[in-house]
Amino acid sequence: MKFSKNSWERKTPAVNLPEQLILEMLDAPFPNQKLTFCEPLESGLANTKIRLKFEGLEQLFLLRVYTRNRNALDQEMLLSERFGKEVPMPEFVYTNKNFRGYSYAIQKWIEGKPLYDVFNNENALNLKAIAKEVAIVLSRIAGHTFKNGGFFKENLEVIPFEMGKNAMHPFVSYIQDCLFKGYVGKWIDQNLKDVVWKYVLENQSLFPALEPASLVHGDFNPDNILINEKTLTISAILDWEYAFSGSFLFDIGTALRFDVPSHYEKTFIEVYEAERNIKLPPEWRKMIKLQDLSNLVGLINTPHECPTMIRDIQTLISESINT
């Protein structure tokens, strides 16, 4: 299945900010600076993004309004402060968690082409070189370890995952809740739900241990990876609001969720193993698909009508259980 997330519908509508409100948001970080252009961006499925240019300043900026999860601002800023020297991330210039009901940040604009654009370009750049760079960056992310797997709270402390009923792995328990208690049944039929659940139960021993754990980006897909076309390096890894402490296999699963060229995948895996000085488990393909199933059922666990996204996820779920 070709990569197509850039065509998915938004579950959280973009915010239409009046120009005067935008100017007021910018007054504290950029007093007396004249705004020369203000361009809303279509990229992203959750938050509202606006590219900014000020008179006399060469640097462009990004106004990012947190519309899905207001608290994600703190997490992204702390991650940038703690890990931004080793992992290319957006740099925060200013934040305000409650300005007239809005939570927003100003970041320095980063030039680059999303990796999915590179995949979809017939005259693609050197994909082996890019695969190497992506693997190196992901290995640096996974190199930051934590005692337990779990979600982050204030100051990036980890709230450990809790085991489900009958000592069920938390990811297995989450998949069960999405399948049978959420909105998933609105989008996939009972037969597929039963097949997915049977597959998960039969393979639950392949879900990775909860400890020790690594830093996980949580949405390491090609539209969040910016490529510098001149140097074939990573300009930035975007959108860290889903980050958590868990298995490094989670990010590999997201990175390879959609079809990628075989030589890209081969180089990516070889370089990743070399950088981490590890060998992936023999059943790593099934393991990453199992972990990504938790992502997929979470995405489809929505009451919103998103026909393109839902169609793609239905296909991805079917592919995952036939790995």
Image (cartoon, rainbow, N blue to C red):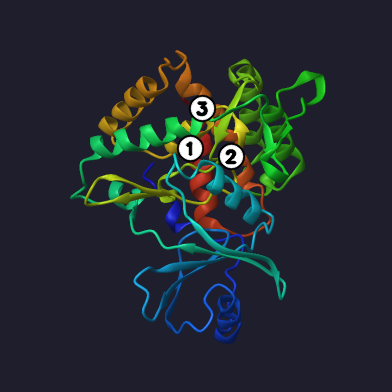
Q: Against 181, is 199 above or below?
A: above
Of the image marks 2 and 1, the number of the one nearer the N terminus: 1
Instruction: Identify which amino acid the numbered label 1 is placed on.
Output: Thr
Of the image marks 3 and 2, the number of the one nearer the N terminus: 3
Instruction: Identify which amino acid the numbered label 3 is placed on.
Output: Leu
In the displayed structure image, the side of residue 94 where residue 118 appears, left or right: left
Determine the residue positioned at 60% across, 72% down: 15
Between the residue at mark 3 and the residue at mark 1, the CA separation in whole angstroms equals 9 Å
Q: Against 227, is 304 above or below?
A: below
According to the image, label 2 marks what residue?
295
According to the image, label 3 marks what residue?
249
Instruction: Identify which amino acid the numbered label 2 is placed on.
Output: Asn
Q: Against 187, is 278 above or below?
A: above
Of the image marks 3 and 1, the number of the one nearer the N terminus: 3
Between the residue at mark 2 and the residue at mark 1, the CA separation in whole angstroms equals 8 Å
Q: Nearer the viewer, residue 188 or 214?
A: 214
According to the image, label 1 marks what residue?
254
Is there CB contact under 8 Å for labels 2 and 1? yes
Q: Against 244, is 238 above or below?
A: below
In the displayed structure image, the side of residue 266 where residue 201 appears, left or right: right
Q: Position of residue 16 (x, y in %)?
A: 58, 77
Q: Is residue 319 visible?
A: no
Determine the residue positioned at 38% across, 26% down: 272
